Image (tube, rainbow, N blue to C red):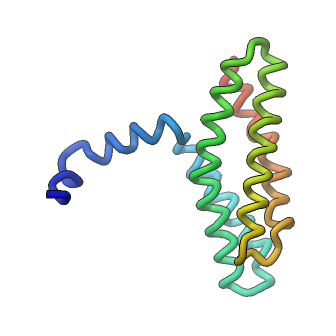
Amino acid sequence: MEDQLITRPGFLRKILIFFSRFIDFPSAIAGAIVMGLIVGAINSGHGWWPAATAAMKQAAYTFLFGGMMIKLLYTIVLAVPGKVKALILSVLAVSVVTVTLVYLVHSLKGTPMPFASTLPTIILAPPGFFFLASRKKK
């Protein structure tokens, strides 16, 4: 019975459409690949297993929560009147949440260098969010 539900035509498409309301899939995939590779390289001096663990945690976080943060960014930037105010509030709010959550994820067991693993997010997230918010606010 359950197998018929999953194999029904259009089932996966419906799921993707539903979740696309909450996750920006293109940005989530690109971010997961880029940030996972960067964090893996940062932790590579500690061996392949710790580096892979840190990379996978970063990629999974970036895909799921990064994609959701971008949707939140779009919601805030469109809800706040005035371009400058909307850009500042949306980028600041989403950047603070993102950096905090990334640091918490890497502070859990498995990442040898939590702060160094968070540094790429601190550096890359605000300009990336600003770029995306600017495009959306036009």
Q: How many marks?
A: 0
Residue 42: image location, x then y, percent: 79, 72
For residue 31, side relative to residue 41 (left or right): left
- Residue 57, above or below 23: below
Name which residue lies at 84% across and 27% down: 88
- Residue 68, above or below 32: above
For residue 138, side relative to residue 120 (left or right): left
Residue 82: image location, x then y, percent: 79, 12
Residue 91: image location, x then y, percent: 78, 34
Name which residue lies at 55% across and 40% down: 24
21 or 125: nearer the viewer: 21
Residue 45: image location, x then y, percent: 80, 83
Q: Quadrant of the C terminus?
A: top right
**Residue most toward the top?**
82
- Residue 119, above or below 70: below
Q: For residue 97, which quarter of the picture?
A: top right
Name which residue lies at 39% across and 43% down: 16
